[in-house]
Structure formats: C-alpha cells, structure tokens
Amino acid sequence: MTTDEQPIPSVWAREPRCRREQPVLGRSQIVAEAVRLLDEEGIDALSMRKLGTRLGAAATSLYRHVANKDELLELVVDEVVGELRVPPPGPDWRAAVHECARDIRAVLLRHPWIVTLLGGAGTAYLGPNMMRFSEDMLALFEGAGLSLPEANRAMTIAFAYVIGMTSTEAAWLTMLTRTGRDEAEWMRRMWPVAQRAAEPYPRLRTLYAEQGGEQGDQDPRRHRDEEFEYGLDRVLDGLAPLVP
C-alpha cells in the first residue's frame, strides 16, 4: 500500500463497522465515562485499561469502537464541543460574539483538560459537533456582513483568542485545585513575593506597585472576567472595520 492509499488515522475517517451482535457497551457510554474520568482525574489518568475498569469491561471491548486512545480523544473533544452554543445572527454582532466567547470559556473551564487537546487531537475538527459549531459561528459573522472567507478568518481569530486566554486560566485553576488553596488567599500570600521578584525591573516594579492596593481588595474571579472581556473587546475592535 502506498502512502497515498493509507487510511487517515482518525475515527472520523473510518467507515462504521458492521456488527452482527449488539455490543454490551455503546460508543456514547464509553465517551461519556471518558469525559467523567478526565473531569475527575485529568488527562494523564486516562488509559483504555482504566476506562474499561470504570465501565466494568475489558479494555479489549473498547477497541470495537475506537482503534486506539487517540481516536477516543477525538471523540471526547467532540463530546465537549457539543456543549457549546452559538447565538443566532442578529443586529448586534459584537454582543453575540461576546455571548458565544463567554460560553466557550465556561465550557473549557468546566473541562480544563480539553485545552491541551484542542488542535492536537487528530482530526477533531471533522467531528459532527465541531462541524455544527463552526457552521453556526460562520453564520454569526456572515450575518454581521462579512464575506464567507472573512467570516472564516474572524471565527479563527476569535476562537484562538478564547483558547489562548482560557488555557492559561485553566492551568492556573487546575494548580489551585491540586494545592487545595483558595484563589483569593493564594493571591494575598503570593503578592508580596511577586513584588520582591519585580524589584530589579523598573517597569514591572512600577506596575506591581500601582496594582498592589487593587490586588488586595479585588475578587480574583472578577479580575479574570474583566481581563477576558477587555482582550475580547480589543480583538473585536480589530474586526470591526471589516463589518459594513
């Protein structure tokens, strides 16, 4: 078999297998349990053997539905993407994009392990939920007056911003969960350490000094929300000249 003839290594590229007997486990059951395992224990804990144990089945029975762990990850990514909702096109495109971006961020923070998989889980973009999400996002930007190619670029830029901001946020919250510390308490304890570390650097020293009073009084969650909204507004400011 030549390289061109080799099948694409993706669950979405394979034809469904025909079975005479109905398997005990269904694909949806396997994927749902995999998502629960990932939510509870993180990406490093996922293995076909462990997943099989949680389902009360041998790992070999899972291979009736997926060829390997990579295909399983494609399926769990698409499962989580199925939670995303895109508002219909309307007169206020910026408000609609803000609503969609907040929803994406909330879903990713609910499943923080997924940020390490997006873009790297094989051909996850071919999953039906990802296809539906992309179609709805294109409709939103096209409804704002962008051409279809411009809508595609705008969608890519907006999605990349949300993923970039949220991946850092998810890593931060995962670290807090691991340590068992409250976010506000952690910030109060770390702020003097950060100020001392910034002392040799004049710009950082000034910045930390100006933020010192605010940092002690501010709700960390509200601060993260405000930073996210500020950055998203700047992204949309860049796209606004394209909108008729």
Image (cartoon, rainbow, N blue to C red):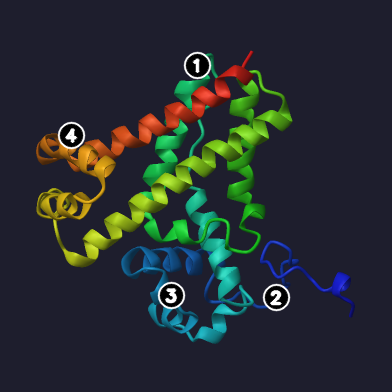
**Do the numbered discs 1 and 2 sit on residues whose CB atoms are within 8 Å?**
no
- Image point (20%, 55%), residue name: 197
Q: Residues within 10 Å of mark 4 (few under 14, many from 20)?
A: few
Quadrant containing the C terminus in the rendered view: top right
* Residue type indicated by callout 3: Leu
Mark earlier in primary sequence (1, 3): 3
Q: Nearer the viewer, residue 139 or 26?
A: 139
* Residue type indicated by callout 1: Asp
Mark earlier in primary sequence (3, 2): 2
In the image, residue 158 lies at what x, y percent?
53, 36
In the image, residue 37 lies at what x, y percent?
38, 69
Q: Nearer the viewer, residue 74 or 147?
A: 147
The Cα atoms of the two marked residues, 1 and 3, are separated by 42 Å
Residue 154 visible from this viewpoint: yes
Mark earlier in primary sequence (1, 4): 1
Q: Is residue 18 left or right of residue 116?
A: right
Q: Nearer the viewer, residue 68 or 212?
A: 212
Mark earlier in primary sequence (4, 3): 3
Residue 56 visible from this viewpoint: no
The Cα atoms of the two marked residues, 1 and 2, are separated by 50 Å
Mark earlier in primary sequence (1, 2): 2
Q: Residue 210 got which mark?
A: 4
* Residue type indicated by callout 4: Glu
- Image point (45%, 28%), residue name: 234
In the image, residue 140 lies at what x, y percent?
59, 27
Judging by the rendered image, the residue that carries numbered circle 2 is: 19
Q: Residue 92 got which mark?
A: 1
The Cα atoms of the two marked residues, 1 and 4, are separated by 36 Å
